[in-house]
Image (tube, rainbow, N blue to C red):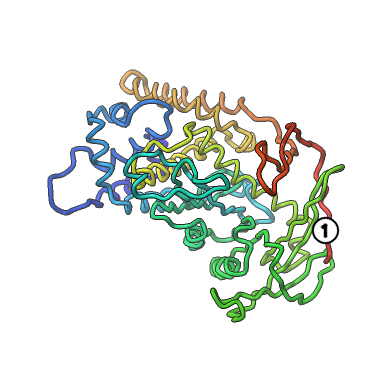
Amino acid sequence: MAALGELIGGERLQRLARFRRSPRGRKPRVPLTQLLPALIFHFINDAGTLAEHLWALYQTPLADSSWSDRRERLPWEVFLELMQRVLRARVVRRRHPEGFWRGWRLIALDGTQFSVTNTPIIKATQNKAKSRRGRAAFAKIVTSVLLEVGLHNPVAAAIGHKGQSEWQLSLSLLAQLPRRALLLADRLYGCAAFAWHAFQTCQRVGSHLLLRARTQIKVKVVRRLPDGSRLVRVPVRQKGKPRVILHWLELREIRFGVGRKGFRSVEVRLWTSLLDDKQAPAEELAQLYAKRWEHELFYRELKHQLRKTEVLQSHTMETAAQEIASLMVAAALLAQERDRAAAGKVPVLRVSFIKLLELMRPLWLVLALGDDLLEEWQKQQLTERCYAQARHCVSAKRRSRSCPRAVRQPVSGWPRLLKNTSCEQPLDITLVQP
């Protein structure tokens, strides 16, 4: 509760209590100031019911059926405001130098999908996505996240429980881009339409973008730069009328081949609003773009380490969205605890996420059960020892490793994987001048 209180703030949590489905009716027995922490605590833990976790925090009884009814009546605006108040930038340049590049805060944008269980209400109201082999096994909720790559801390999140696409959600997140940030994004966003919206936002808050552009987009070359990059003008066309050009966007384009000895090289095309080749050399930006992969590692921590189930626990789309929102707050909480465990002595991302989680769960339980048995100095000393233990659980330095892009089952257009191999040779990055 102390860690959560530091993250949310007591006054902010009290303001959320004004949300109610209807101004009439009796006051709920469990207020939002207890309901929301219990939800977050529940989704951090591996086992147990919401009623058990509410009792662990507040010694307040509430039946599981009452929990279900209460969650269904919670307005979504509660969780929107909760994420807006909790998710924010936390990287500090002196403490987290790996989270910056030449003074720019590294922010990645990417989306993912969460599977929801096949309950009758979800099957009746949701369409499952099509795949190469038919319908998907589960309905999906698309989620998009702005992430500080140096801390794996979510800065903002958008959850599409009403059928919104990743594109729509990501566009809505641009308004929450921090100041003096460098936005990293993959090929889904590497088109003129998204680049135009991202560029306008970056201009407003003093930030820049670095996108992997799609290869088929044609541009006009303005001039070539000494470092091998070039200034280009990108046409922003009207939707549905490709012959109508609404705007011309001037960006810097970098093309480079990346590969390993004995393997085929892949050409990558980047667009950036950093136009000065001396302040932002092309080779450095080519290597920097690889940090976007931290977003994928964040989703792995969120899905496979924090929550080890293949599908969300919730039985409706609305409560599933609540679960994802609680997971985002839990991820911010654990990023805060991970930073505190690192204490500036080791890089934050070298502290093992799963080991930290395994230490925090029993620590919180002991502090809850021994609240009236332990003195304040004993609680503090026990907490510091857990942080010190987490600092000893440091992951080895990440290897430069890649695996073949192949699948085990025969699918048209993909090579078949017969033997699992990997390559750990150093990457070879070569600038390409088309």
Q: Nearer the viewer, residue 242 or 236?
A: 242
x and y, in percent, of residue 328 in the image: 45, 44
Quadrant containing the N terminus is top left
User: In the displayed structure, does residue 158 sit left or right of residue 226?
Assistant: left
Secondary structure of the residue carrying numbered label 1: strand
Residue ID at (49%, 37%): 334
Give residue 121's quadrant in the image: top left
Give residue 299's quadrant in the image: top right
User: In the displayed structure, does residue 311 sit left or right of residue 266?
Assistant: left
Q: Is residue 35 placed above or below 268 in the rendered structure? A: above
x and y, in percent, of residue 361 in the image: 44, 26
User: In the displayed structure, does residue 412 sit left or right of residue 10?
Assistant: right
- Tell me the amino acid under the disc marked 1: Leu
Local crowd size for mark 1, using a 10 Å CA cut-off: few (<14), some (14–19), many (≥20): some
Residue ID at (53%, 34%): 304
Per the image, the residue denoted by label 1 is 431
